[in-house]
Amino acid sequence: MSSENVKIFDTTLRDGEQVPGCKLDTSQKLVIAERLEELGVDVIEAGFPVSSPGDFNSVVEISKIIKNTTVCALTRAVKKDIEVAADSLKNAKHPRIHTGIGTSDSHIKHKFKSSKEKIIEIGYEAVKYAKTFVKDVEFYAEDAGRTDNEFLARVCEKMIEAGATVLNIPDTTGYCLPSEYGEKIKFLYENVKNIDKAIISCHCHNDLGLATANSIAGIVNGARQIECTINGIGERAGNTSLEEVVMIMRQHPDLNLDTNINSKLLFDTSKMVSDNMGMPVQPNKAIVGANAFAHSSGIHQDGVIKNRETYEIINPLDVGVTESAIILTARSGRAALAYRAKKVGFDLTKNELDLVYYEFLKFADLKKEVLDEDIPIIIKNSL
Ligand code: KIV
Ligand code: ZN
């Protein structure tokens, strides 16, 4: 049975770029946008054009070079924002305007000092207005994670009526549990009567470390777009990580869901974004962290050397990592030492290995990690 497609909406250049100190200039954004298209994302959120002339210019330039991918610009539910976004997208082959407004009680009361009815009216007018410029309009119900489901369903129905093609249900504050977020998506599919005219999108933040789990709960319950960033960068604790959701779908064919992503470019793209933003990737980051395919304890190393699948569920080549790493530390065993010694040209017999291993442990206790260049020295000292 062929898998159903889940669209990947990449917001590295918008929500991702909101990280303090990670600002990119237009030329850096262009290089990343081109790579995102090559990676196979369906939508690139290129910026929030009304926010600054620089952001406007970036969306203009990205729109000129991107060929097949949809280029999207963010707005508030404000006429001027929508006009500026439409202008910035003039050259895009597939333009999308992403407009919206806060829908939770907290946003309605404190941010807008408004009422539910008025919020629906403002959202409706914004979508209608955006539709006068582009066919493809996505509506976000900001703080949908904390919005009452009945009201959210009313909002969605009205926005589809106004012409929204995608309904973004952001867990803006990263508050929801996966079961709760999944239920929310299910509720919308069951209670919004015109839902067949739009797709639901998940946009989850990572304040409780649940962004990926929540996005997966969303697609399991029918959502067909995930908004995410490379390396999971974004406001506060970040957004859903693109590489994680893509590989979850790949590694679980039972979900019967897949994306258009060329996963072999994931590692390189992660490095490109990290280098350009000056934002290091944590070594234990799933899929793209330096330790994601590194084994350092003796038991694990022995298993991986015998058969990679004993301790690895992903083939590193599938995400663009050339090979699994066997790291030599004081926790390594003989199998790892023999394996690494062989790689640098020493095929040790069993007796030799016993002698070298004893010397190796003394050396390793003094160092965090034993490197290739240390191996000949250890061997020379022991034999
Ligand atoms: O987190 C959020 O709610 C957002 C919206 C602007 C889409 O980023
Ligand atoms: Zn966000």
Image: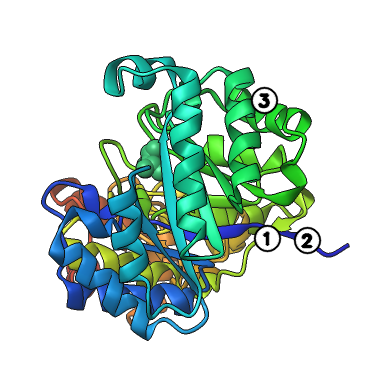
For residue 49, the mark is none
Q: Residue furthest right?
A: 1
From mark 2 to mark 3, how far is it between C-alphas?
Answer: 22 Å
For residue 3, the mark is 2
For residue 183, the mark is 3
Within 10 Å of disc 1 (Cα), the crowding (few <14, some 14-19, many 20+) is many
From mark 1 to mark 2, how far is it between C-alphas?
Answer: 6 Å
From mark 3 to mark 1, how far is it between C-alphas?
Answer: 21 Å
Q: Measuring from the top left, give residue 366's x and y in whole percent.
A: 13, 48
In screen coordinates, is 380 left or right of 76? left
Question: Which amino acid, by three-letter code, is at mark 2?
Answer: Ser
The answer to whether 191 is drawn above or below residue 84 in the figure is above
Disc 1 marks which residue?
258
Q: Nearer the viewer, mark 3 or mark 1?
A: 3
Q: SS at mark 2?
A: loop
Residue sitting at x 52%, y 58%:
131
**Residue 10 in which image quadrant:** bottom left
Closer to the camera in the image, 352 or 148: 148
Mark 1 vs ligand 2: CB below 8 Å: no
- Given contact means CB atoms under 8 Å apart, are the residues at marks 3 and 1 in contact? no
**Residue 103 in which image quadrant:** top left
Upstream in sequence: badge 2 or badge 3: 2
Question: Which amino acid, by three-letter code, is at mark 3?
Answer: Glu
Within 10 Å of disc 2 (Cα), the crowding (few <14, some 14-19, many 20+) is few
